[in-house]
Image (spheres, rainbow, N blue to C red):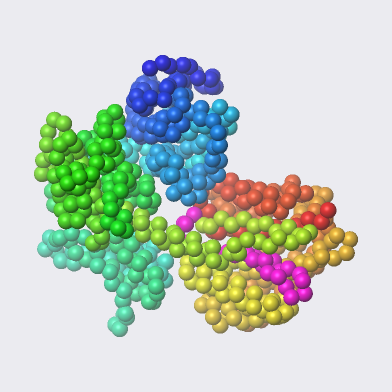
Amino acid sequence: MAAEAGPATESGPDDHVRRVRLPADRRTPAAARAIVRSVLAEAGLEELLNEALLLTTELSTNAVEHARTELDIEVVADATGLTVTVSDFATGHREELTAGPRNVSPDIGEVSERGRGLLLVDHFANSWGTTHLPSGKGVWFHLDRPGAPVDGARPREPHRPAGTSAVGGSAPSVGAMTALMQVAPDSYGDDPLPEFAAELLTRVAEMVGAAGGAIRLDRGDGTGEQLLARYGRPPRPGDELLRVPLAVNRPYSGELELDAAPSAYARPLAALMVERLSLHLENDRLRRADVRRQTWLTFLAEASELLAQSLDVELTMALIPQLVVPRLGQWCAVHTTDEWGRLRLAAASHADESVLPQLHAVLAETGPESVQARLREASRSGSQMPLGAPMDGFAVPLVARGQRLGTLAVGRHQRHRHDSDEVAVLEDVARRAALAIENARIHAERRRVAQTLQQSLLPPALPVVDGIGFAAEYVPTGDDAEVGGDFYDVVPLPDGRWLVVVGDVSGKGVQAAAVTGLVRDVIRVLVSDGRPLPEALARLNDTLVERGGGRYCTLALAAVGPATDGRLDVSLHLAGHDRPVLVRGDGGAAFVGSGGTALGLLDAIASPATPVPLGPGDALIFYTDGVTERRRGRELFGTERLRDAAAPLAGYPAAVVAARLRSAAIGFSAESPRDDIAILVLRNDAV
């Protein structure tokens, strides 16, 4: 294969660098791996070998299959670790990826459409990003060097190609795949279950508002039922407890009990927590049942941990073949069942990449003696089925919570047949994989429900008004399956003016969303009846005191209408909300408004009106505390930093101001937002 040196890049005296141009050929991924392997050997970074080879294979394969052009590969090993960049020369439209706290897309499902390689890169790399150049597009990833730097030297920033967007976050520990593939298992230490169970129990109890709870486990060893973890106070006589049995195999048995008020989400959350705990309980059962099989148990524990880290369906299914091949089989294919019972190939891998197209072709064949027919039989019967030539192996059904999710097909080793222990481990991997897939599907459904509910609390679009510019940005909390309490709205008033509303209801979840919807609806009804804003706020406060369930709300209201000389008259009312920032069209920014009383806490409130005239080009910026309380370590983004970021935006359209402030808040920290971020900009667009 022809090789050509790539462009020069700055490097240190101790760096190891390779730049090679490779053709669009099926042998390219193997050549790319050889380059990475040689650099790691020279740099003494063999502990990164498995992750580096896996991610290099995915990126180079994606480039060959989708770009179909030559590709440049650059490998740099330096004091910080390893950086690999794969660039193609495809012309035409390229999607721009928006930088986020962990992924370059806010929805990992969008990334998965470009190939599962990016899912694996996002999961295993410490940081990664994209390069957009006139000649094409590249993707790079960085793996941190394990351990402290030599001689206590501070490591340099990781090598990053010019013109790139970077993504960082909490990746799996360095060497996760290496640890998974190790032959000698670690010794079994102290029992980690009580601490882990206590953490899960505390988390679910706080989410559902339980006064107490307990997890009881009977290992079937004659010692009887043991208290594994407890939260809060013990149950009292007459308490009605929520009980969920642990999904464990014999001889294990047990249950979770919660002293929680009945609600629509208490039992599903408790069941999800029980299933999460079941993976670790299964590890504990196997370790105690057969100490002589520590190697396989280590493999199963690490596989479960890797699968449990992902709550994305596509990523989970992409990981399964990587766990099986080559240790447990020559090839592996995961098929899932759709709503009509048809099997769909979700992921496949082969120890010999050159045979992968043949594997796909055989899996796609139909007929009474085809692999497809045997897979359907295994899925229907729920039992293991042998697979005949040419792809000798067997199929194991994927079943979780009584649901048939598909099949896990595994090809036999070339030199020996699977023994009983390997078959048992594969069946266990299939069980754990099915549980991980089902958990990911449940999380995806919760995420869809949360997103739908969140969207229902926000206007689908802001009104277009001559001479007045409206723009808003909303970023939900990092937990995309949780509903926040931040909201905004723009409502027409009977006198021809417009009412801008920005609010924040305390707490998160379904109850906070219900209160948020209540606040929005009450405001719309009151102002449409022509109620003055002070009266509307007083009535809304009475409603929250009576029906808010102890939750309160901060609110900023601004009635805006045209005045003379191209100005806008704004009447601003603040009910415990942060003061908005006024940005003058000719420069300068300041906070305006007088503080008032938050709604839902007291029987009587005060919310003085503040007139804020807006000249042509002036903008008024409303926001919630998710912006000012964005945290980087112990440092907060804060109101002063917000004002300083808004001042240079004088003269820009409302949409630009909102987008720039959103980017400033998100870019302040690499962590996912802990609270919702809402920004609304009102601007005088008069010429």
Q: Nearer the viewer, residue 58 or 578?
A: 58
Residue lying at 33% horizontally and 51% vertically, measured from the top left: 308
Q: Is residue 72 visible?
A: yes
> What x and y, as percent, mark residue 83?
45, 30
Residue lying at 81% horizontally and 63% vertically, measured from the top left: 568
Please state, as top left, top right, bottom left or bottom right, where the N terminus lies in the image: top left
Residue 479 covered by magenta stretch: yes
Q: Is residue 55 visible?
A: no
Residue lying at 72% horizontally and 80% vertically, measured from the top left: 531
Residue 37 covered by magenta stretch: no
Residue found farthest to the right: 565
> What x and y, as percent, mark residue 196?
32, 56
> What x and y, as percent, mark residue 349?
29, 37
Stretch in magenta: 478-502
Instruction: State which quadrant residue 599 falls in.
Output: bottom right
> What x and y, as percent, mark residue 53?
35, 30
Q: How many marks?
A: 0
Q: Is residue 650 shown above or below 684?
A: above
Instruction: State which quadrant residue 58 falls in.
Output: top left
